Image (cartoon, rainbow, N blue to C red):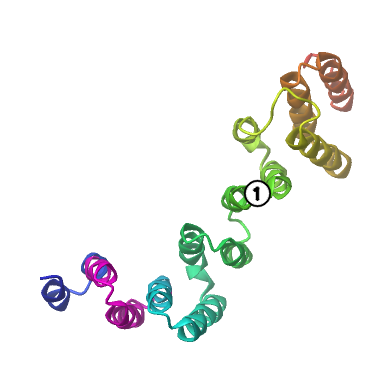
Amino acid sequence: LFEEAYSIQKNGNTYQSLYGVYMAREEFDEAAKLAKEFAKRANQLRFNVDQAIALEANGEQKKADKVWAEIEKGVKDRPNQALSIAQRYKDLRRFEEALAMYRIAQANNPKSNLHYQIADIYSAMGRIDLMYGEYLNMIEENPNYLSSVRNLLSRSVSDDPESENNIMLKEALIQKIQQTGQPEYSDLISWVYVQEKNFGSAVRQGIALDKRLKGNQSEV
């Protein structure tokens, strides 16, 4: 039934259905052949990912490694496909490869803001320090992200000033304040102090921010 549907109309839906059936039946060789054919037909490297997965499931690791390498090379030639490949790698928990794809996508389109996606991968890898770095970079590129970043940070910040996450975030914020002088980072570190119920430091930071902005302590 699925083979017939695919033979009549070769599109993404019929392909996914047939590929899923082959994988469920453990007909990995047929799944790999189908994915290779459809990838060429659609000119989309993300279907070569299916090919590599099927080859690995079939115990053909060397062939799978060759396909993974071909995907990496292909993305460098066709960087507009990097985002879709990055998402597939993320879903497969191939985090290092996903990061590499996001970097290629970012280089291909410098105006794209992929810091959130990259931060999400660092979070899954347990690299909270790098996750914080990406969140703060979002603000450096566009200060309007301040509120969104604060909400994201609230998931990992606690009321314990000695927690590892709080310490890492405060260190990252101090570094950003020193490097850029952007008031949004001062605002954020004041917010962290408030979460810690360290209101004295929050007030002092607010006063310092007001002075930097030549205000009159309106933030406090």
Q: Name the residue under label 1.
A: 126
Q: Circle 1: is it few (<14), some (14-19), or many (20+) Cα within 10 Å?
A: few
Left or right: 89 as drawn, with respect to 55: right
- 166 up-or-down from 204: above or below: below
Question: What quarter of the picture does the N terminus occupy?
Answer: bottom left
Q: Identity of the amino acid at label 1? A: Gly
In the rendering, at what x and y percent does residue 20 appear? 27, 66
Left or right: 54 as drawn, with respect to 209: left
How many numbered discs sit on the rendered protein? 1
In reply to whether residue 125 is colored magenta, the answer given is no
> Quarter-wise, where is residue 45 in the image?
bottom left
Q: Give the range drawn in magenta.
A: 17-45
Left or right: 5 as drawn, with respect to 55: left
Residue at image position (81%, 19%) is 202
In the rendering, at what x and y percent does residue 115 appear? 62, 50
In the rendering, at what x and y percent does residue 164 appear? 77, 37
Residue at image position (46%, 63%) is 88
- Magenta segment main secondary structure: helix
